[in-house]
Image (tube, rainbow, N blue to C red):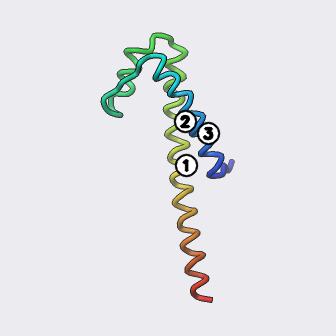
Amino acid sequence: MSISFTDAQKKLEQITAEMLELIRKYGLDAESPFDVIPVARAKIDNQQDYIRFLELSIEGRIYGEYADALQKQLDEDAKQAVAQKKLH
């Protein structure tokens, strides 16, 4: 399955919006990225919301890494296209 950069960005926006709802709902205020899971575990008292929080965390990571890799590839392709034009 191949996802375009635009689709990955849209999915990241959806994930972020849903994650922000949970952050606001439970007052999640981690001091650092390393504290996010322990804070969520302590503050989210609804098991379904906690599971969804973890799912969103994983999905965000996957889509974020995919978008970064795709952006790097697009940048590299653009550099190669410029180099090819200079040769011709």
Closest to the camera, between mark 3 and mark 1, is 3
Mark 2 Cα shell of 10 Å, populated few (<14), some (14-19), many (≥20): some
Q: Which residue is mark 2?
A: 59
The residue under label 1 is: 66
Q: In this view of the protein, which residue sits in the foreground, 60 or 16?
A: 16
Furthest-top residue in this view: 45
**Could you say where residue 69 lies in the image, as x and y percent from the top left?**
52, 55
Q: Secondary structure at mark 3?
A: helix
Under mark 3, the amino acid is: Lys
Q: Residue at x 50, y 11 (%)?
A: 46
Question: In the image as oriented, which residue stretches furthest toward the left?
Answer: 31
Q: Say whether disc 3 or disc 1 marks the residue closer to the N-terminus.
A: 3
Q: x and y percent of residue 49 in the render?
A: 53, 17
The image shows residue 42 at horizontal and vertical percentages of 37, 15
Q: Kindly check if marks 1 and 2 are in contact, taking CB atoms under 8 A apart as contact.
A: no
Q: Which amino acid type corresponds to the residue marked 1 in the rendered image?
A: Tyr
The residue pinned by badge 3 equals: 11
State whether residue 58 is above or below residue 3.
Answer: above
Taking depth in this image into account, of 8 and 55 the one nearest to the observer is 8
Is label 3 in contact with label 2 (beta carbons under 8 Å)?
yes
Q: Residues within 10 Å of mark 1 (few under 14, many from 20)?
A: some
